[in-house]
Amino acid sequence: MTFDYDLFVIGGGSGGVRAARIASGEWGAKVGLAEESRMGGTCVIRGCVPKKLMVYASGFPGVLEEARAYGWQVKAGHFDWPMFRAKLEAELDRLEGAYRNTLKNAGVTVHDARATLVDAHRVRLASGEEFSAKHILIATGGRPFVPEFPGSELAVTSNEMFHLDALPKRALVVGGGYIASEFSCILNGLGVKVSQFYRGAQILRGFDDEARGHVSNAMRAGGIDIHCGTDVMRLERVAGGIKAVATDGSEREFDLVMYATGRHPNTEGLGLEALGVTLGRQGQIVVDRFSQTAVPSIFAVGDVTGRINLTPVAIREGHAFADTVFGGRPTAFDHQLVASAVFTQPEMGSVGLSEEAAREIEPILVYSTAFRPMRSAFAGTQDRVLMKLIVSQATRKVLGCHIVAPDAGEMIQLAAIAIGMGATKEDFDRTCAVHPTMAEELVTMRKPVRTA
Ligand code: NDP
């Protein structure tokens, strides 16, 4: 049987683009890709990239303050949001263009349309055009989820945050995960008065307790009004803005309410269930370790599979899929030991097990130090950093590393190499310090602070 394409990819985000590029450019497959929105997906268009640029923008008031403490005569002006937003939009246009070029150069045919499945080997575009393909890859990502409650339509999500006409004076951020905590810090840094409501006892659930405590204390010290154990009951439009009536009985007014209460996979309306593709409780596509669904010709990678919702993971899953199916090299991406960073202020980088998770598995030693780094001590600020290692008592292997510090994301990337190689505490200790740095503490912690 002949097909129009060897591979048809639905979704032009991180996972889909990588899979299409490798299948076509490296392995010579005939590849078509459909994207209904902008090329680049969540990460490039409405996620990691614009978010990180906003993180940078929001860090300057702190830097200027520090500069004064170091003897610079500087005065902060006001933040020109429309100017920043225009530059941001131009940068995203440039990146989208780069993604399109990459696909073009790899020989992939791009269809700017929504695609749905007709059967196990056929897709239909919104235009009505149909194509057959030997393999179909679903890489449609996810979207923000806002729970239903009275007034929920007044809330915005991270999608809208990059397009605001003006910055609010007072904002409420709801949620305690990556997105909520990052946007609380961004808005706070940009001069917005921020409150954050989280239904649980401590933000950033799932990360090491000591590290998340350190981040939330620093966020509070930086001026963010964090309310744990608090949720919104209803939102009402009032003359001065939006009134939030909360479970703690409080009623507060804000100019903007942003919900970051998780993301759901984009599987609705694709025609997956009718074909026999298994979906999980949240609607995510269930796949095996080679990203194959219950229908042998249909594969799925990235956030739509709800494994680990991170761009580099989607990229690796997409690459592994292309190598497996078109390169004759069965490759399964290993989801263990994926490092990540939360771009709060201060930043948090983590790899491996938290203290709480590790001690459930085996006896551990905890090495941890919190201190004022040279840069803040000189400036007279109270900013502290945290360096923490979780070590197996039996094997001496470092099971987890948690860093809360400026540029923790950069540091954890390197720690992840060592930990991925199975480094022991002795390997860390043998490594000569780089002085004077914050990260040198990772190789100079001699005594455990506790066993567990
Ligand atoms: P998360 O799943 O990280 O957090 C969702 C938050 O919303 C949790 O605090 C959760 O509470 C809360 N929540 C969920 N449902 C409700 C509800 N009905 N009412 C009130 N609160 C609720 O999702 P995010 O949206 O923050 O991020 C999505 C994913 O995107 C992350 O999992 C991450 O993988 C990825 N991401 C990664 C980034 C990075 O690498 N820096 C940055 C941004 C996103 P509870 O804890 O009680 O469940």
Image: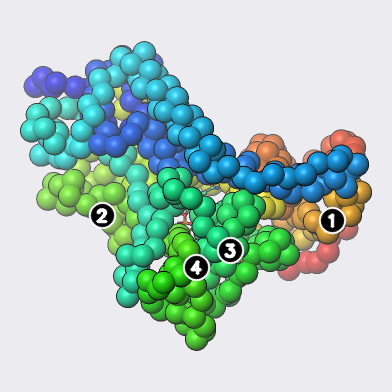
Of the image marks 3 and 1, the number of the one nearer the N terminus: 3
Q: Nearer the viewer, residue 407 or 107?
A: 407
Whether the residues at callouts 4 and 1 have beta carbons within 8 Å, the answer is: no
Residue at 15% over, 40% down? 117
Q: Which residue occupies the foreground of this view, 109 or 38?
A: 38
Q: Secondary structure at mark 2?
A: loop
Q: Earlier in the sequence, mark 4 or mark 1?
A: 4
Camera-side mark, 3 or 4: 4
Q: Residue 287's x, y, as percent?
A: 32, 46
Q: CA distance from mark 4 to mark 1?
A: 30 Å
Name the side, left or right, on which 39 lies relative to 293.
right
Rounded to the nearest angstrom, the CA distance separating label 2 from label 4 is 38 Å
Q: Is residue 143 left or right of residue 428?
A: left
Residue hosting label 4? 254
Q: Which quadrant would the N terminus be assigned to in this image?
A: top left
Choose top left, top right, bottom left or bottom right for residue 363: bottom right
Closest to the camera, between mark 2 and mark 3, is 3
Placement of 380 over or under 68, stated as above or below: below
- In the rendered structure, which amino acid carries the disc numbered 3? Val
Tell me the number on the disc at residue 381.
1
Give the residue type that dot 2 points to. Leu
Disc 2: residue Cβ within 8 A of ligand 1's nearest atom:
no
